[in-house]
Structures are given as C-alpha cells and as structure tokens.
Image: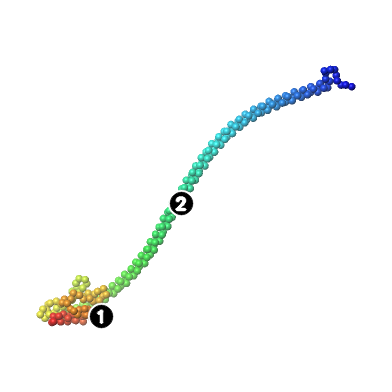
C-alpha cells in the first residue's frame, strides 16, 4: 500500500522533518554568524592588543636601547679607565725599574768606594807604621847625633884651651872649626874647615881653607874609628905642615 498523499503534498512526517532541518540550518547559520561576529570582535581586540603590544615593545626596546647605550658608554669609560690605569702601572713600573737600576749603580759605586776606602785605610796604616819607624829611626839618629855633639863639645873644650880651636855653628847645621896659633909669624891667622852629618849620619868635611890633600883620608878614618880627637889633631898637624912648607 502506497504512502504517497495527494499530488504535490508531502506526507506530514516528511514535512516535519524538513522543518526541523530548516530550523537546524537557521540555528547553524545563527551560530556561524555569532561565531563570525565574535571572531571579528576577537580579531579586532587582538589587533588592538597587538598594536598595544607593538607600541609597548617599541617603548621597551627604546628604553632598553637607551639603557644599553648608557651601559655601553659606561663600559667604554670603564675600559678607558682600565687602559689608563694599566698605562699608569706601566709608567710606574718603568719608573720603579729606573730607580732600581740607579740604586744598583749607586750600590756598586758605594761598594767600589768602600773598597777604595779600605785600601786607603790600609795605605794610611802602612804610612803610619812607616812614619813610626822613620820617627824612631830619626829619634835614634838624633840621640846619636846629640851624643856625638857632646863628645865633640868635650873635644872642643880640650882643643880650645890647648890648640887655640874655636867652633861655630853656621848655616845648614854645619859646624865650622877654626884653628889659630898655627903660624908663628901670624898667630891670629885662621885655619878652618866645616863639618856636618850627612844622610847616612856619617861625618862629612867641606870648605877647608887652606885646602888639604889629605882631608879625604882623615874623613874616612874618623868615620871608621869615631875618634874625633885624633881627627882634629891630624887636621891641625896638616895645617902646620902647610905653614912650614
């Protein structure tokens, strides 16, 4: 049995189903429109948010760039300060090294002068010892000379009384011996010679008047024998021989 109704009409059940589809399609369309509107609204809000975020990013990026620029300048200043500090340290080290080298040179000079001073001190000590030895030698020689002069003085006193002898001290620490009473015709006529001690502390005769050829022999004998009285007697005897010859 057929379920089809009058021509052009749908069965009630089918019409109801169609109505439901249309309602669902209308509801879907409504939902789609609401979703699209919400989507556009969200997109618009999101676009505004993106613009805001972009502006915020720009501000943050600008602030960061400024801070970074300041930081870079500070870092550059720190680097410059560090380099300057290094240069100062280098200059100070160079100056310290120069002063150290100068000090080492001074120490070497002081050490050299110390050695020179020690050598000079040793030389001075040697000179002092040599001076002491020479002083002692001179003192001994002086004492011996004084003893000789005393003996001479005694001999002079004897010969002055007996032989008409006069002794005078003249220049150069010389003694001048003057005999008289030798020439009977002229008793006051002087016969003389000079005597002194040489560097070897020996008798040395000079300036004899009149000249005696044998004076050198007399000088050698008195140096050997130290007998000054005999020397004076021989000289007087030689003067007498000259007068009578």
Which quadrant would residue 55 be assigned to in this image?
top right
Q: Residue at x 20, y 71 (%)?
A: 171
The residue beneath circle 2 is 93
Secondary element under disc 1, as helix, strand or loop, is helix
Q: Residue at x 76, y 24 (%)?
A: 24
Q: Is residue 52 left or right of residue 34?
A: left
The residue beneath circle 1 is 224
Residue sitting farthest toward the top: 7
Which quadrant would residue 117 be assigned to in this image?
bottom left
Which quadrant would residue 156 be assigned to in this image?
bottom left
Is residue 14 positioned above or below 84 on the image? above
- For the C terminus, the quadrant is bottom left
Query: In the rendered structure, which disc, 2 or 1, sits on the residue that comes first in sequence?
Result: 2
- For the N terminus, the quadrant is top right
Secondary element under disc 2, as helix, strand or loop, is helix
Q: Is residue 201 left or right of residue 244?
A: right
Spot occupied by residue 186 in the image (x, y as percentages of width and height): 10, 78
**Would you call the spot at circle 1 few (<14 residues within 10 Å), some (14-19), or many (20 or more)?**
few
CA gap, disc 2 to disc 1? Answer: 83 Å
Spot occupied by residue 68 in the image (x, y as percentages of width and height): 54, 38
Q: Are marks 2 and 1 in contact (CB under 8 Å)?
A: no
Q: Is residue 155 visible?
A: no
Q: Residue at x 49, y 43 (%)?
A: 80
Q: Residue at x 48, y 46 (%)?
A: 83
Type of colouring: rainbow
């Amino acid at each position: 049995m057929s379920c089809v109704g009058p021509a052009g009409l749908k069965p009630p059940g089918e019409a109801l189903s169609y109505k439901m589809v249309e309602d669902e399609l209308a509801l879907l369309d409504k939902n789609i429109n609401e979703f699209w509107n919400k989507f556009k609204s969200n997109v618009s809000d999101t676009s505004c948010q993106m613009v805001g975020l972009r502006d915020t990013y720009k501000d943050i990026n600008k602030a960061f760039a400024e801070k970074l620029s300041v930081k870079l300048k500070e870092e550059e200043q720190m680097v410059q300060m560090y380099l300057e500090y290094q240069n100062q340290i280098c200059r100070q080290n160079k100056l310290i090294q120069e002063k150290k080298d100068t000090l080492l040179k001074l120490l070497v000079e002081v050490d050299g002068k110390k050695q020179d001073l020690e050598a000079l001190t040793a030389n001075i000590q040697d000179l002092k010892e040599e001076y002491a030895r020479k002083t002692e030698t001179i003192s001994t020689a002086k004492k011996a000379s004084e003893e000789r002069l005393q003996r001479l003085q005694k001999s002079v006193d004897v010969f002055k009384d007996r032989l008409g002898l006069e002794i005078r001290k003249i220049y150069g620490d010389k003694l001048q011996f003057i005999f008289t009473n030798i020439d009977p015709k002229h008793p006051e006529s002087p016969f003389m010679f000079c005597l002194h001690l040489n560097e070897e502390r020996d008798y040395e005769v000079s300036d004899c008047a009149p000249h005696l050829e044998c004076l050198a022999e007399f000088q050698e004998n008195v140096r050997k024998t130290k007998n000054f009285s005999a020397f004076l007697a021989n000289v007087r005897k030689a003067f007498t021989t000259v007068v009578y010859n």
